[in-house]
Image (cartoon, rainbow, N blue to C red):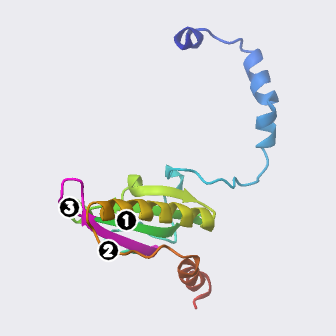
């Protein structure tokens, strides 16, 4: 049982040897950066940055966005904003807000982010997947709005402007 294991103490000599001798720890001592695509946004990107925090109405920091308008399952008007932004550390992020007009604050919250990672193709897949899901639900409830998918070209233009000023 886990609680029983937690109550047992390890020998002081064995623990440091086992941990420091572990092959995983030896591999991670290099300065190489991780190239994964975490599913959720973590708090390691807080602090000073080139890209300011996103506020829903101003759309600052967003490279592309889509709005799906329709009805929720109760028949009430619903507005869903899905966007792609570039965060500090060369991280792409996909955000989604339902009915931002009903929020107390315009500030985007960390739980508004659906995905973050380094690969543009993965970013487009996450954003277009969320967009398609919302569009299908809206269509099933009677919405007739057509929404264009996010495209690589529309993200590269602001990225080039950001880096090269053109």
Magenta span main SS: strand
Q: Are marks 1 and 2 in contact (CB under 8 Å)?
A: yes
Q: CA distance from mark 2 to mark 3?
A: 22 Å
Of marks 2 and 3, the one in the foreground: 2
Q: Which residue is found at the position 79% from the left and 30% from the top?
A: 22
Residue that mark 3 sits on: 102
Q: Which residue is mark 1?
A: 135
Q: Earlier in the sequence, mark 3 or mark 1?
A: 3
- Total number of numbered labels? 3
Indicate the secondary structure of the residue bearing disc 2.
loop
Mark found first going from the N terminus, 1 or 2:
1
Between 24 and 140, which is closer to the camera in this rendering?
A: 140
How many residues crowd around disc 3 within 10 Å: few (fewer than 14), some, or many (20 or more)?
A: few
Residue drawn at 76 percent across, 52 percent down:
31
Q: Earlier in the sequence, mark 2 or mark 3?
A: 3
> Residue at 43% across / 68% down in the picture?
83
Residue under label 2: 145
Question: Can residue 48 be seen here?
Answer: no
Counting from the top left corner in percent of width and height, residue 77 is at 20, 64
**Is 72 or 63 nearer to us in this picture?**
72
Q: Residues within 10 Å of mark 2 (few under 14, many from 20)?
A: few
Say which residue appears at 81% left-offset and 33% top-offset: 23
> Mark 3 and mark 2 in contact (Cβ < 8 Å)?
no
Q: CA distance from mark 1 to mark 2?
A: 8 Å
Find the distance from the CA under tag 3 to the CA under tag 1. Answer: 21 Å
Residue 37 on the magenta segment: no
Magenta residues (range): 61-78
Placement of the N terminus among the 4 image quadrants: top right
Is 76 within the magenta?
A: yes
Residue 49 is left or right of residue 89, and the answer is left
């Amino acid at each position: 049982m886990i609680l029983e294991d937690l109550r047992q103490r390890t020998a002081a000599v064995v623990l440091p040897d086992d941990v420091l001798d572990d092959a995983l720890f030896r591999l991670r001592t290099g300065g190489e950066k991780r190239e994964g695509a975490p599913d959720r946004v973590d708090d390691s990107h807080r602090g000073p940055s080139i890209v300011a925090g996103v506020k829903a109405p101003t759309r600052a920091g967003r490279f592309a966005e889509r709005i799906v308008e329709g009805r929720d399952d109760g028949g009430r008007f619903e507005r869903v904003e899905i966007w792609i932004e570039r965060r500090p550390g060369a991280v792409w992020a996909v955000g989604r807000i339902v009915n931002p007009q009903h929020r107390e604050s315009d500030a985007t919250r960390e739980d508004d982010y659906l995905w973050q990672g380094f690969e543009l193709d993965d970013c487009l897949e996450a954003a277009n997947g969320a967009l398609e899901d919302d569009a299908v639900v809206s269509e099933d409830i009677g919405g007739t709005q057509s929404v264009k998918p996010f495209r690589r070209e529309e993200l590269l233009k602001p990225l080039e402007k950001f880096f090269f000023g053109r």
